[in-house]
Amino acid sequence: MSPRVLLTGGSGFIATHILGQLLQKGYWVRTTIRSDSRKKEILDAHPEHVTQLDFAIVKDIAQTGAFDDAVKAEPGLDYVVHTASPFHFHAEDVDKDLIQPAVQGTLGVLQGVKQFAPTVKRIVITGSFASIVDQRIIPGPGGKLYTEEDWNPITHEQAIADPVSGYYGSKTFAEKAAWEFMKTENPSFDLVMMCPPMVYGPIMNSQTASSLNTSNQLIYNILTGKTDGKIPEEGIHIWVDVRDLARAHVAALEAAGAANQRFLVKADGIYSPQDMADILRKHYPDQPIPVGKPGTGIGIPERDYFLADNSKSKKLLGMSYGNLENMLVPLAKRLLALEK
């Protein structure tokens, strides 16, 4: 029998790629969606895999017991991949709109599985580099090498100060809550945390320019000249291709060495928006891409920028990573189609 997986947030940017790879590998997948309107979109995207797909409606991940029904299956589930969590900087109430949904959503999945899905062997959660990096010192200090051993020291008081801090706090507090749950509840399943930085790459669902995920919005703005002729500033200069991140999630489901581990999932090297502009201008010379100072990006580790170590993901998950140009060119083609 095919392995059976619950994938939360199935219409999200990262989740759509995870879903596609799971289906290609023969997994049976139940995915959570907020409303029935997303069901047809997902089925239409995978016409050859409709018999492998099932759906559960979860309208609000922060509600108590939100995932209780979704984790109940017959035969039972083998794995859970939890991607559903807010990622935006437009919260009016930081605690209510960002922090609480992230923490309660994560705990809700863990609690639901422990109580109602005894066959689950492993839960893989999409966390963030935000739980590792100290955003107070972005983009420095020069020479700092972040690893999975590092934690963001943000406090709740600091997190509620503004939406950006709220996002960093939400990811940090949600992950800490997950590990505390594992320690105090001692469930029968193990846990894997993915901690990616900026996530870029192809769009698989029916997005519009106004509904782009936060990361791809940066590339769209550069490509279409929506930056007032300037190269945008970006404090986080490490990234990962969403296709590689999805592959890491799938690999983590069954990799023996992944049990109860964090993974800093990132492409090799570092980048800057100047690097992006240089690449995009070469392939799309007719676009109003800002010029900036060509060739002065940070495509190699130097100057006063922190670095991050992805060797653990390579060793335990067998990961290798694509380069910036191979991600940007096809993504740009898709983004330009949104203009038409």
Image (cartoon, rainbow, N blue to C red):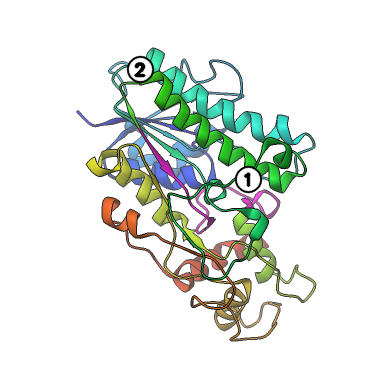
Q: Residue furthest top?
A: 115
Disc 1 marks a residue whose amino acid type is Tyr
Residue placed at 41% from the left, 61% from the top? Answer: 309
Comparing 223 with 255, the one in front is 255
Would residue 248 be counted in the magenta stretch? no
Expressed as whole percent of the image width and height from the top left, the position of residue 312 reads 33, 55
**In 3D space, how far apart are the residues under numbered discs 1 and 2 (Cα atoms)?**
30 Å
Residue nearer the viewer, 253 or 286? 253
Residue 195: in magenta span = yes
Of 142 and 120, nearer the camera is: 142
Image spot of residue 35 (x, y percent): 59, 27
Q: Relative to 230, does residue 146 appear above or below in the rendering? A: above
Position of 26 with respect to 170 (left or right) is: left
Q: Which residue is mark 2?
A: 117
Instruction: Tell me what residue is drawn at x 61 percent, y 81 percent.
Output: 281
Q: Residue 208's spot in the image, x, y percent?
A: 65, 51
Q: Which residue is mark 1?
A: 168
Q: Which mark is residue 32?
A: none
For label 1, the SS is helix
